[in-house]
């Protein structure tokens, strides 16, 4: 009886080495990856039988104290610990709102003088301005940025840092979807990505969690060359997970000059 909680605990347990938590035993002496179940239980101060029930999905609502102890043993950061806590709480799927870009947001995107587009929680581009489309084909309306990033060779031509950022992209997706993993659209997307990309499949199995925010993007444009841009993600208030994404360059840099040419 599998559960998201059990899958998460198992994946994160396999990533922790005995030496990380002060236990003896090198990797060559062990038949399992990472920590054994009984070692996690001992370090968390719970019985091995109870921890086994958690991993097997036979118990899905551990106490706050147990969750905090497991987060410490599994060396989870703040985002990972928050995700573990969410997985351990009873939940109902929230009602979905209509997935439309508000007219005012669309107007704003079209009038901005920097590349801008709006994506939904599944990374479908819903609207984009002409600068975004000119900057990268991955920013055009109708493109699913996840599928393109992991399966489209053109994506790597325009985005040479894709492999470098792949783990972060997948970890952000897990964080944003959260516990709503029984969403049919989400399940279909993950299934398609897992079939088409071994890289995605391996990263998804790690159950990494990372909250997204401002970061940088390296874009290799066939006409204006390499651009190093800031990328900002702004939540669209009142929508069901829509984000407006903007790219801009530091004034006076070669990237700013190249962006101006577009």
Image (spheres, rainbow, N blue to C red):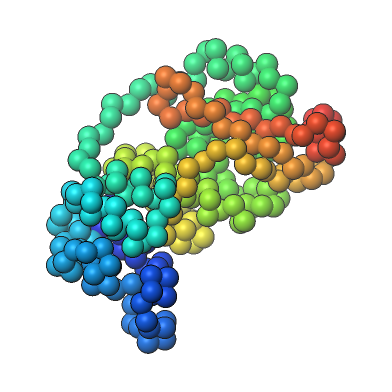
Name which residue lies at 74% across and 42% down.
228
Who is closer to the viewer here, 13 or 100?
A: 13
User: Splitting the image into 4 quarters, where does residue 118 fall?
Assistant: top right
Residue 211: percent from left, percent from top: 48, 42
Q: Is residue 104 left or right of residue 71?
A: right
Name which residue lies at 49% across and 23% down.
236
User: Splitting the image into 4 quarters, where does residue 216 fall?
Assistant: top right
Residue 119: percent from left, percent from top: 52, 31
Q: Quick check: 111 above or below 247?
A: above
Q: Quadrant of the N terminus?
A: bottom left
Q: Is residue 129 left or right of residue 41?
A: right
Name which residue lies at 55% across and 12% down.
104
Q: Quick check: 43 above or below 207?
A: below
Q: Is residue 49 visible?
A: yes
Residue 70: percent from left, percent from top: 29, 58
Q: Is residue 164 left or right of residue 223?
A: left
């Amino acid at each position: 009886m599998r559960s998201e909680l059990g899958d998460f605990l198992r994946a994160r347990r396999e990533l922790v080495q005995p030496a990380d938590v002060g236990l003896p035993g090198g990797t060559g002496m062990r038949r399992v990856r990472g920590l054994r179940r009984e070692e996690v239980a001992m370090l968390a101060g719970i019985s091995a039988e109870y921890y086994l029930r958690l991993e097997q999905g036979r118990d899905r609502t551990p106490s706050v104290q147990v969750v905090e102890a497991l987060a410490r043993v599994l060396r989870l950061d703040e985002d990972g610990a928050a995700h573990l806590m969410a997985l351990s709480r009873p939940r109902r799927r929230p009602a979905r709102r209509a997935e439309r870009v508000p007219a005012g947001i669309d107007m704003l995107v079209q009038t901005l003088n920097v590349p801008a587009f709006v994506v939904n929680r599944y990374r479908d581009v819903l609207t984009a301005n002409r600068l975004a489309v000119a900057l990268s084909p991955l920013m055009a309306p109708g493109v699913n940025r996840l599928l393109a990033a992991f399966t489209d060779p053109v994506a790597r031509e325009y985005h040479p840092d894709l492999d470098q950022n792949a783990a972060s992209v997948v970890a952000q997706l897990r964080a944003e979807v959260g516990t709503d993993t029984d969403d049919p659209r989400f399940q279909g997307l993950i299934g398609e990505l897992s079939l088409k990309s071994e890289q995605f499949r391996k990263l998804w199995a790690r159950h990494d969690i990372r909250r997204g925010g401002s970061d940088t993007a390296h874009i290799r444009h066939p006409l204006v060359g390499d651009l190093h841009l800031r990328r900002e993600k702004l939540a669209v208030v009142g929508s069901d997970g829509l984000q407006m994404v903007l790219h801009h360059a530091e004034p006076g840099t070669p990237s700013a000059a190249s962006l101006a040419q577009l």
